[in-house]
Amino acid sequence: MTRIGIIIGSTRPGRNGEQVAAWLQELATQHAGEAAVFELLDLKEFELPLLDEPVPALVVPGSNPHTRRWAERAASYDAYIFVTPEYNGGAPASLQNAIDYLYREWTHKAVAYVGYGIFGAVMAVQELRGQAGRLRMADIGPQLALTLRDDFVQNTQFKPQDLHTSEVYQLVDELLAWSTALAPLRAAAQAAV
């Protein structure tokens, strides 16, 4: 069974990411059935300080207890969905920081994006797509762009449009296909360790 981590990228008080991620998890689980399990990973729970490892993760895995806890959890998934807002035209610092803590844990895994914000967080997702390639992740084409105007009441109560259900299904289908295609690469990398 494919394991998908849904990463809530914002740790900000009053964030909308929890509502979006819970809705996404429910729809994805209904659609994928027995083919996959979708688990929430709330960055707020990991309490990662600003990157404090002395050596980049590309060179050597982190050694701090919080790094190891985050690395072990992230490594246990076959693919990810990043749920991200857009702050000042980019992804939140909390998500960027969590990504920077790791390297091998991301390699040969598929990643999808669900963005929310004034314009659906398209600039934040574009920034994350560029980074995914450098981490040797496969970022899939479909993305979900939720706007504060159309998918939220007074910018805080999540009320997604019905059309997003089929978009989630398409995103899940492609994420599972890519995760399956990348499985031999993940297995070979694991055997080499």
Image: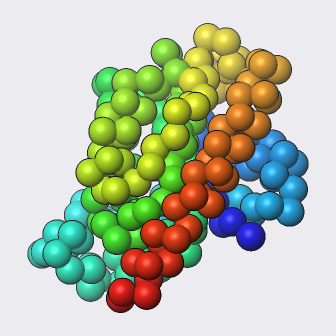
Q: Residue 142 falls in which quadrant of the image?
A: top right
Percent x, y of residue 12: 46, 44
Toward the top, the furthest residue is: 149
Percent x, y of residue 80: 55, 55
Q: Is residue 30 left or right of residue 113?
A: right
Percent x, y of residue 15: 54, 38
Quadrant showing the C terminus:
bottom left
Q: Identify the residue at image location x=69%, y=66%.
A: 2
Give whichever of 177, 99 is nearer the camera.
Answer: 177
Q: Residue 62 falls in which quadrant of the image?
A: bottom left
Q: Identify the residue at image location x=16%, y=75%.
A: 59
Q: Is residue 55 left or right of residue 135?
A: left
Q: What colouring method underlies this structural image?
A: rainbow
Q: Is residue 5 visible?
A: no
Q: Is residue 64 visible?
A: yes
Q: Identify the residue at image location x=68%, y=19%.
A: 151
Give whichever of 10, 109 is nearer the camera.
Answer: 109
**Up/down of 156 relative to 24, above or below:** above
Q: Is residue 185 left or right of residue 35?
A: left
Toward the left, the furthest residue is: 54
